Image (cartoon, rainbow, N blue to C red):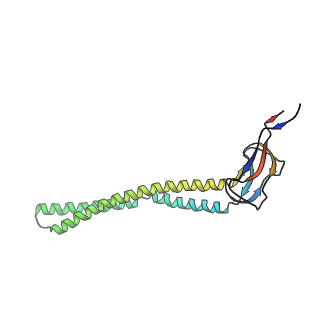
Amino acid sequence: EGHVSLINDVDVSAQEAGVLTKLHFREGDSVEEGQMLAELDNADATVRLEESNLNHKVAVKEATNDINVQASRSAAKVAEAEVAESEAVNAQSPGSIPMTKLRRERLTAERSRLQVEVAELEYEVAGITAEIRGQQVKAAQNSLQRRTIAAPLTGVVERRYKEIGEWVALGEPICQLIRLDRLRV
């Protein structure tokens, strides 16, 4: 009557492809859920994380520097003041400022107003770019984390499928665990 049947076992698989660099278990070992079982080569992933961190820093600097917006607003104020001054002079003594000069000043003022819009748009885009770079940092962190393989449950390592130095494909099993908290007698 006293026969024991195991409820479930699970193959623990790689979430990224790479060379198996470390194994932290032997067959027959008991492991806790979340315990690190194996590690894949992470040199490339580490470099990508550093690169995305630097890109993010640059993007944040650009997104928090509104000097172009300020400068273009100042230039627009100067150009508008020149137009107002010329118009005031002509109002007092008509024809003092030639129409060609006034037209040129008005066009300069209009172009300056448009430069403000361009600078504001670029500043807004820099903010969005910084957010994108932040997401790329998270993606690089996740990619690095996926190169460590943890036990999905508490159990015993029944068998090992891979050796250190072997290439592991995405989704390929590294070992088999048997859940020991679920025995049916």
Q: Which residue is at the far top?
A: 1
Q: Which residue is drawn at 58% across and 53% down?
A: 138
Judged left or right of residue 27, residue 83 is left
Q: Which residue is drawn at 36% across and 60% down?
A: 118
Quadrant placement of the N terminus: top right
Q: Where is residue 99 in the image (x, y as percent from the top left)?
A: 15, 67
- In the rendering, at what x and y percent does residue 150 appear? 72, 49
Give the quarter of the image for residue 90: bottom left
Q: In this view, does 34 lie above or below 120?
A: above
Instruction: In this rendered view, identify the residue nearer to me: 73 or 29.
Output: 29
20 to 7, vertically: above or below: below
In-front residue for pair 75/172: 172
The quarter of the rendered structure image containing the C terminus is top right
**Which residue is more in the foreground, 20 or 88?**
20
Q: Where is residue 32, by image quadrant?
A: top right
What is the number of callouts on the image?
0
> Residue 160: horizontal and vertical position, in percent?
80, 52
Q: Quadrant of residue 120?
A: bottom left
Q: Which residue lies furthest to the right in this view?
A: 1
Residue that appears at 44% across and 59% down: 65
Left or right: 122, with 182 as reference point: left
* Residue 58 percent location from the top left of the image: 51, 61
